Amino acid sequence: MAAKKKNDAYVSMTAGQRASWLAVGFVKYFMLALFSFIALVPIVSCVLVALKTDEEYALTPVMQAPANWLNFSNFKTVWVDGEMGRAFLTSFAVVIVVVACSVLIGSMLAFVLNRFTFPGNNLIRSLFLFATLIPGIAMQVTVYQIMSSLNLINSLVGYIILQCGTDVISIYIFIQYFENLPIDLDESAILDGCTYFGVFFKILFPLLQPAMVTVMILKGIGVYNEYYNANLYLQDKTRYATISTALYSFTGPFGNRYNVISAGVILTLLPMLIIFITCQRFIYSGLAAGAVKG
Amino acid sequence: MTQMTSAGKPAQPSGFRQWVLQPKVQKWLVIISFSLIPLILLFVFTYLPFGKMIQFSLFDRSYTKVRGFVGLKNYARIFTKKEYFGAMLLSLYYMGGALVQLVLALLFATMLSFKTKGGNFFKGAMFFPYLINGIAIGFIFKFFFTRGYVLDTLLGAIGFNKENLPYWLRDQSINNISLVGTSVWKHMGQNMVMFIGAIMSVDATLYEAAQIDGANRWQQFKYIILPSIKTIVVLNVILSITGSLSAFEPPYVIMGGGASGTATYFIKMHQTAHVDQKVGMACAMAVILMIIIIIATLLQKLIFKYVIKDGTDSKAKKPRGGVY
Amino acid sequence: MKKFLSLFIVLSLCAVLCASALAELPAYKDLKLGEDYTDLTASVKVLNHRTDLKDTKIPQYIAEFTAMYPNITVEYDVMTDYAEESLTRLSGGSNWGSIMGIPAIDKDELPTYFIPFGTEEEMLEIYNFADQWAWDGLSYGVPSTGNAQGIVYNKKVFADAGITELPKTPDEFLAALQAIKDNTDAIPLYTNYAAGWTMGAWDAYIGGSATGDATYCNQVLPHAKDPFSDNGKGYGPYYVYKILYDAAANHLIEDDYTTTDWEGCKGMINQGQIGCMVLGSWAFSQMVEAGPNGDDIGYMSFPITVEGKQYASAGADYSYAINKDISEDEQIAAMLYVKYLTEQSGFAYSEGGIPIDKNGEYPALYAAFDGIEFVPDAPALPGEETLLSDLNSDSELRFNNGGDAKVQEIIEHGFNGTKSFDDIMADWNARWSDAQDYIGVEVNE
């Protein structure tokens, strides 16, 4: 029906209108194609160069296709010399623990703030609200001093605690979500003899799934790609390298050998690509949801 | 003494159970156990460093050694020395970039919210850079901008004379633009996805009605799309101020820690604290950064309150503190 | 009651004394490698900047050492941005490891972080440059190797450019660079701008090499009025940086200096793609080993002549220091490893360094310094030990203390013609005298 209407509209256009319709369409697709090209070219150039041998890299123009599309020797180099395998394990472990903690901490606090009246409720809300005004990066200097006096530097636990930190955004996402969960749920559970703990863990927590996905995505992407704190707090890079710090350490030994560096870049990017392709829908909706409250 | 304490406690486990199961006791148990950890984290990683930051900013000190109290000298220095003030001005480049980024994001979000062949591909391609690790992006673009490499090759292919191309990273009149470009490259898609989300939340019948009324695309954009996403656009403009001051990874990786006049405010702050070991000075920089951000946030609140009344009124929900 | 109390005090004093006697570490200089503490069980963790030796010499050293001390495990943590990273770690608490090369800290902070190896005097008896990191009569750092400051160059490139005699003055040097540019394809002077620390390295030449005066850095500079002005004599700090500025201004340096590659430059000079680089003598062996043409690499002194004579700044490279907050066993193990590195590993010699061990030999490259006097920096005057670092911190120029950015700016301004050299130096003078004012230093005209 709609398509037919559109066709009718198209048919009823004058030649001039038709021309401008086509022109707009052309400009639109041209722009989309151009910017998608710009978005992808830097990545594609890395793929091309990552498949080249040292000699090929030195002699051929950078955008020329590699002689052998299956030359994975650079990937092997970074995997072995760059110790990327270990870095992946560390990063995955950190992401999983931090995401789990954030979900738990955020939803628990949101539950308390949303479901209970008690003196201090508004105070806690304001404390967290004011915290959003103080940018985390402004405090990195004194946070470092505090972490040092708590003996949490060079410790995976310390880094994880720091990453959980003050996560106002996820608390807000959960509060927002709780507001849409009817109280009847709680009340009937209490009538059935549930404690408040029971209400939270048995009844409400499983219902939080959509909010959890949002928090997991926002937090997961952030933590996986985090460099600044990983570099500062996980100082012993032989033990605690994350993918960001492992990748950064390429600046020294691999210098300007972009064929090797690019292989590292592609490796770090692969997990994200896989997750993106499989969970595209959740990522988009998660970002949109996170942004409104951000 | 000891006897009395034990007598004071419920004698039987079942009594203790009953005591715990009292709604009032239970309520407080839940409140305390559920909010203790986040409150400790909030205190240790926000308010404690916040207080220390203000205190340290009045001293000439390193992490371990205090040279003395200097009052507001650190602040005076930031506004008088070009090394610090210049870093702040550098943020203007990033703010300009953020503006370009918003316009592009808005443009593509509008395009893609109409029916588009291959829309998912375009959306995905433009969004994906946002998921890439900042350090990886640094390497990608160092390679991209190096003399004679990717960018020069591409421009050469469309007819530019390679000899006349500028040095993207060396030339100090454009190197910050190159770096801002990488930042736009990374974040544009994310803004776009947010805008698409906002546009999609507009009632679809509005578009149909508009089409029937013969509104063209620009009119649809101006009268339907823009009003519905005003809030999120303003929010993003203000977020871009924070983002501009805290730009870190591109200059850090591509320019080896911000050489050739590319050290952003955050890089300068990091180096002041960790390389120069002037922790007091770095804290003063942080306080100023915070003040700027608070001003920006207040500005945002004011704009929401007086300029965009419609958006907030309809959506505003009173915080429902307390049900039980 | 009183009796009890005094008895208690006496007893506890005894306990404290005994405990401190027990905690007394062995004297470093008396330790005998391979004889003392051979059954000690401990671990040693070394923070180090030599990423290039990570898979080559370092495992050999560890193997050789653990052959003598089978129960001591040695582990290295090697990093690229050493100057910055090591400072960050030091300020982050005491669990950074056992041994580190002392970064740019103030001398009065040495006791906060490290244990002394012995008195300054006794350490100077066995090692060269052992007073580099001394505070209050105690020596906290054992130099890893010593450096003379000169220029590493490619002999073949110089010959191809028609340079028959090595330059001895700034003008001769710039003429030589110009000849390389005109007659060969090599980059005349490779600055390694992007690496950062290679820029701060230019500060090492303003003392001995530029003035011939051992007291210049620690005693003269802090009190000097306008130390960066042109004194008209053809030597002094002004001329050191002027060489760099002029080379940049005449485009005698690498083209896209923002994307230089430190590891890559070694192979480039080895293959004759680079004419020369201004780096300490430590760099020589690395350039020799970086390719097949090691014989082409030469070393020469810095082209400044002071009243008809050439000098070379000389001093310690990174000095090993031992963490104060690790267990006594770990400290002893660390001492043994430092001793091994200094006296048995042959590190200083193989790296082309001035020997640290008084019995050590000079490597062959020092033939280049024939007739040139080595000038190690004399320590600061008593009571002024932290003066230079205070001035450095307040002026933010940071000479020999991580002041990379200011040297990078010389290249930027020179290359792009955005600021004249005299203006840069005037700016430095202003910053220096502001700092002198603020700290209240007596300024000698």
Image (tube, grey):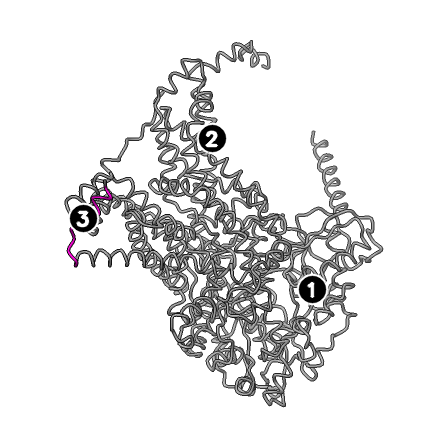
Lateral position of residue B221 relative to residue C26, left or right: left
Write the start and end of the magenta stretch as one range: A2-15
Q: Amino acid at mark 3?
A: Ala
Same chain for mark 3 and mark 2? The answer is no
Chain containing the residue with disc 1: C
In this figure, which residue is indicated by the disc labeled 1? C144
Q: Nearer the viewer, mark 1 or mark 3?
A: 3
Q: Report the amino acid beneath label 2.
A: Leu
Asked if the magenta segment contains residue A73, the reply would be no
Residue A12: say if magenta.
yes
Q: Which class describes the residues within 10 Å of circle 1: few (<14), some (14-19), or many (20+)?
A: many
Residue C421: x, y in percent? 44, 78
Inter-mark Cα distance, 1 to 3: 83 Å
Q: Residue furthest right?
A: C35
Please state the horizontal and vertical placement of residue A92, each as a whole percent of the image.
55, 43
Q: Dot 3: within a 10 Å radius of its alpha carbon, few (fewer than 14), some, or many (20 or more) residues?
A: few
Q: Provide the chain ID for the residue under circle 2.
A: B
The residue tagged 2 is: B36
Where residue A156 sits, quadrant-wise, is: top right
